[in-house]
Image (cartoon, grey):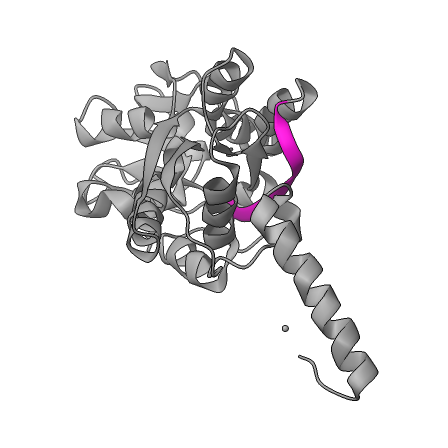
Amino acid sequence: MTRTARRTRRPLQVAAGAAAALLALSACSSGSDPSAKPDSSGSGTLSGEVTVFAAASLKESFTALGEQFEKEHPGTKVTFSFAGSDSLAASITGGAPADVFASASPRTMKIVTDAGGASGTPATFVRNELEIATLPGNPGKIASLKDLTKAGRKVVLCDQEVPCGAAARKALDASGLKLTPVSYEQDVKAALTKVELKEADAAVVYRTDVRAAGDKVEGVEFPESADAVNDYPIALLKDGRNAEAAGAFIALVRSAEGQKVLSGAGFLKP
């Protein structure tokens, strides 16, 4: 099984509406709360660098959104650091300079919020589901999660501290299966690379990564993945150096335009 909101009425109401709009615009400019879903189009001029720490699985879609943001706001530059969410959270709490954190799980976001590192409430912007990545043509005839437990099968998982690894373990536990991988990798891209290089027969990764890999791998869906869907939260960071531009980037990610890019990459709606 392969993979593939307006207004108008009376003068008083108009005045009230204008006041509300002014308040909303002020909130958007502050970028203090991504859960407020600000308007990404904004009329103000943005400038400077925005540093975004994002889960490795967001690399392709966020890179595209970063390029789009720079085109829409000349004078800005979006710099990304993609890695396992746990490593990124540790870097942020350790003082690494960043404006935005997009995590692959609420658990890793909580590391940052518990340390007082977030400004406002993190907002879930997408969800992701697991898939088995096999070699092109699926020579091992892998059709289920259970097939990964066969003797001699070389399987790679993400480290259990990483969201994709925790999700894989949850799916395995839900199905009562025991699996000893040949290696645990620090992020989902590293796990997928093991298959691409033919160093593993299969890896349990996100379906978005299978899609991004194109014909380098083949994807196999499995029903247990429904028990381990990951929510992805995004947050403005308290110690960031460009809150206004960072808030606008978050707004783009959460906008209909941004969601179209993310859906096209295989992410599920929040």
Q: Is residue 190 left or right of residue 144?
A: left
Q: Is residue 21 magenta?
A: no
Direction from residue 51 to residue 13 in the image, left or right: right
State the residue at coordinates (34%, 32%): 80
Residue 235: percent from left, percent from top: 57, 37
- Vertical relation: 190 (above or below) 47: above
Q: Position of residue 190 (x, y in %)?
A: 30, 24
Residue closest to the eye, 19 or 143: 19
Q: Is residue 84 visible?
A: yes
Residue sticking out furthest to the right? 12
Q: Residue at x 51, y 52 (%)?
A: 251
Q: Residue at x 67, y 66 (%)?
A: 21
Q: Nearer the viewer, residue 220 or 163?
A: 163
Residue 160 appears in the picture as rendered: no
Residue 12, compared with residue 39, is above or below; it is: below
Q: Nearer the viewer, residue 213 or 8?
A: 8
Displayed quadrant of residue 105: top right
- Seen at 18% across and 47% down, the residue is 215
Report the side of 261 relative to 25 (left or right): left
Query: For residue 128: magenta?
Result: yes
Secondary structure mainly formed by the magenta segment: strand
Q: Which residues are magenta?
A: 117-129
The percent position of residue 92, horizontal first and vertical second, equals 51, 19
State whether residue 261 is above or below residue 117.
below
